[in-house]
Amino acid sequence: MADETPDTPGPEDRKSDRETGQGGGPNRRDDRRGGAPRGGGYRGGERRQDRDGRRRDGASGEGRNWRGSEGRPRDDRGPRRDDDRRGGGYRGSDDRGPRRDDDRRAGGYRGHAARGGADRPYREDDTRVYRPRPDRKPEPEIPEHIEAGQLDRAARRELLTLSKENADGVARHLVASAECLAAEDLDGALAHAENASRRAGRVAVVREVLGFVYYRRAEWAEALREFRTARRLSGSNHLLPHIADVERGLGRPDRAIELSQEPAAQSLSAADRVELAIVVSGARRDLGQHEAGVQILRELVRASPPQRSWSPRLYYAYAESLLGVDDEAGAREWFARTVDIDRDGVTNAPDRLSELDGIDIVDYGEDEESGTDEADAHEADADAPDADAPDADEADVDGVAGPGTGPVGETDR
């Protein structure tokens, strides 16, 4: 009787098992292609096909673990949908339903009718007014004697960002605007300043000149807009007194006082601080605080000798503040001092002094035979300030110069 011993697989049998996919132990190479996926990689033998659609050899072995847990092949998933989006590729547009002609997702120009409103009936109650764009104003003629080099050197430096031709044109318009202001031709000054602004609207000095033209015309809202723009473009606070004075012109004296209390006011030059103080004094009078208006200027007047550039304006404003507290004698004194030092006529002190004296001044025009003889010339030289006097810009008013103003005579409206 032959011994019944279990067949022990030999090396050849184990090799055959590996090739056929049969055998006791798990086939690690087949595990990578069948069974539950371990995450990532290739997971099924049934999808591993040649380009002609046939499976590779060995993909149909019965011992492979590519079948599901219920024993059915993985591709037994029911019929495939033709419109299955997981298939990828171009599916055409028929499966999306009919396409709208005015579908906004299509992009491109659709015309006015596609946007709607083309067939909208006319409404009689439509109150909208359609105005044509105004024509650009013609460029004002510049007098032949005006040259670009007449503009202040600092202002010329600001025009270096422009082309040379444009910079020269803007410079000439600015000079022409200044000449018109001096001649009281406010319309001509505005025409030149607006033309310069259209050609160089991003240059601070141009917007500043336009602001001063509006200021002289008492167009406060426009002046405020231009001053603020110039201040933003330049980063300088030297226009702060004028901005505060414009706030007074707009009927906002409280706002003028607030501006004088900004930290920027402390960085102003001595002249600008005096100007700001005159504005605030007028704002106090606007609020009925006449005593406060006098106190703001009293120490400044005492600290400012007649040769200072701001003294005529300061003396004038102080005289006006004294009238607010019914000090007519004191007001007359300071109006008279203003007349003595105001050789450029920046104030109307002579008119105010005549009003206090009860004198009516009638201007019959310039006398044709009037002139300045040698005696008058010597008298004028004798009254002229000493050439060795300290420069006005070097005056020290620290400790007494408070918040300041715009033009005197115009600020005391």
Image: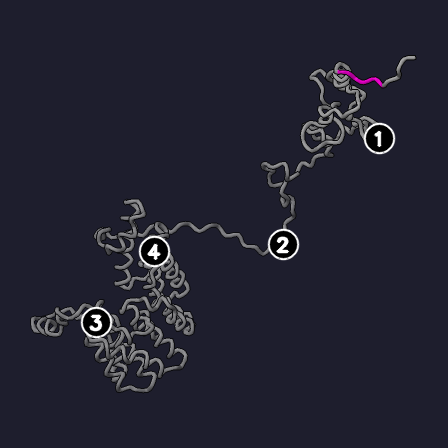
Query: What residue would you read off at disc 1?
Result: 70
Q: Alpha-carbon distance for marks 3 and 4?
A: 28 Å
Tell me, yes or no, if residue 278 can be seen here: no
Local packing at callout 3 (Cα closer than 10 Å; few below 14, some 14-19, many 20+) is some
Q: Is residue 333 left or right of residue 285?
A: left
Circle 1 or circle 4, nearest the eye: 1
Question: Alpha-carbon neighbours of circle 4 within 10 Å: few (<14), some, or many (≥20)?
Answer: many
Q: Residue at x 24, y 53 (%)?
A: 143
Q: Secondary structure at mark 2?
A: loop
Indicate which disc, 1 or 4, sits on the residue closer to the N terminus. 1
**Location of residue 412 (image quadrant):** bottom left
Residue at image x 30%, y 78%?
A: 297
Secondary structure of residue under mark 1:
loop
- Position in image of residue 247 (x %, y %): 40, 69
**Span highlighted in magenta in the image:** 6-10
- What label sits on residue 367 in the rendered view? none
The span from disc 1 to disc 2 (Cα, nearest Å) is 77 Å
251 vs 4, nearest the viewer? 4
Q: Closer to the camera: disc 4 or disc 2?
A: 4
Single out the mark in the foreground, 3 or 2: 3
Q: Amino acid at mark 1?
A: Glu
Which numbered disc covers residue 124? 2
**Mark 2 surroundings: few (<14), some (14-19) or many (≥20) residues within 10 A:** few
Q: Give the secondary structure at mark 4.
A: helix
